[in-house]
Image (cartoon, rainbow, N blue to C red):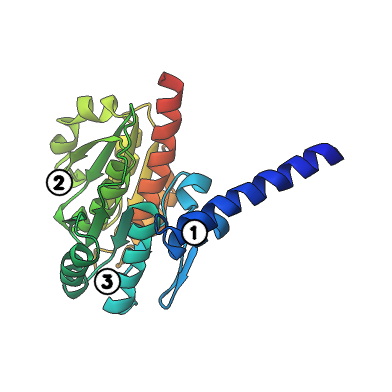
Amino acid sequence: MNQVDGFESIRHRKTGMRELLEAVADGSLSPAQAEAELAGYVTGDAGRFDAARKQRRGIPEAILAEGKSTADVVALAEAALETTDRALVTRATETQIEALETELTVSFPDATVERRGSTVRATTDGFEESSLEATVGIVTAGTVDGPVADETEVVCADAGATVDRIDDVGVAALDRTLDQVDRLRDADVLVVAAGREGALPTVIAGLVDTPVIAVPVASGYGHGGDGEAALAGMLQSCTVLSVVNIDAGFVAGAQATLIARAIDDART
């Protein structure tokens, strides 16, 4: 960068800051929104919310409710709505979900709050929904895998991908899996959640030519229980697949979203 370009860059930054200050002064922008514009995050009593993660990483920050007080979860969700018009909350308890449904609609009268299992998504009228020309297939071996797959589904749907949910097709009755081969092959990327010995992703990856992301689920008992056997089996898969950590439905959804976005870019 030469000296002229450097001065020009500084001038543009000063102009942008002046516009932000004027917007805060006239009330069209809140201090939190201005902070998010300048720093990329907003700071509150409950911590910092990464308001720029979607622009920087392609995936918005999700608020992990597990281990947090209900008040902190609500405060972080409010910060998310104020700065990005969207909040994603994972691993929420019933008490936390009830508080989110009640308090967010008070703080933001135009907010829509939706839940799927223990995952909550809230948006305001200012949020622009995305659309991707790509399909994510989300597969569960059994009912116990559903809550983990719910996280994946919310993330992928939020990104605008078409989600094809295929439930209860575990290898204990392989005909259930084979009956769904056409749907599995139609998906652009697959996320497969399974507990116990975790065989389902390996079987499916041997039947399709699309990327498969395996999610071990903390089910089973005795030796290798709590998802450990499933994780080990998926890591040792003789068919090609990728593996996330135990119960990491959000991570799997984020990875599938990035793949779906790349496919969408290629198609458009």
Q: Tell me whether the residue at label 1 lies in contact with that at label 2, contact meaning CB atoms closer than 8 angstroms.
A: no
Quarter holding the N terminus? top right
Quarter of the image for residue 111 reads bottom left
**Vertical comparison of 180 with 125: above or below:** above
Q: Going 40% across and 27% down the picture, which residue do you hit?
A: 264
Q: Quadrant of residue 101?
A: bottom left
Judged by depth in the image, the label closer to the viewer, 3 or 2, is 2
Residue 53, percent across and down?
48, 52
| Three-letter amino acid code of the residue under disc 1 | Ala
Q: Mark 1 points at which residue?
A: 34
- Residue 170, percent across and down? 19, 46
Q: Would residue 75 appear left or right of 103 to someone viewing this image?
A: right
Q: Compared with residue 143, is residue 2 higher up or lower down, i.e. above or below? A: above
Find numbered disc 1 in the image and state the secondary structure of the residue it sits on: helix
Real-space Cα separation, disc 1 to disc 3, in angstroms = 53 Å
| Residue located at (18% from left, 39% from top) | 166
**For the view shown, which residue lies furthest in the front direction?**
26
Instruction: Name the residue that disc number 2 marks.
Output: 168
Element carrying mark 2:
loop
Within 10 Å of disc 1 (Cα), the crowding (few <14, some 14-19, many 20+) is some
Image quadrant where one finds the C terminus: top left
Q: Which residue lies furthest to the top in this view?
A: 267
- Name the quadrant containing residue 11: top right
Residue 53: tell me if it is visible: yes
Q: How far apart are marks 3 and 2 (CA)?
A: 23 Å
| Rendered location of residue 87, percent (x, y) | 32, 57
> Residue 222 shows which numbered tag?
3
Q: How many marks?
A: 3
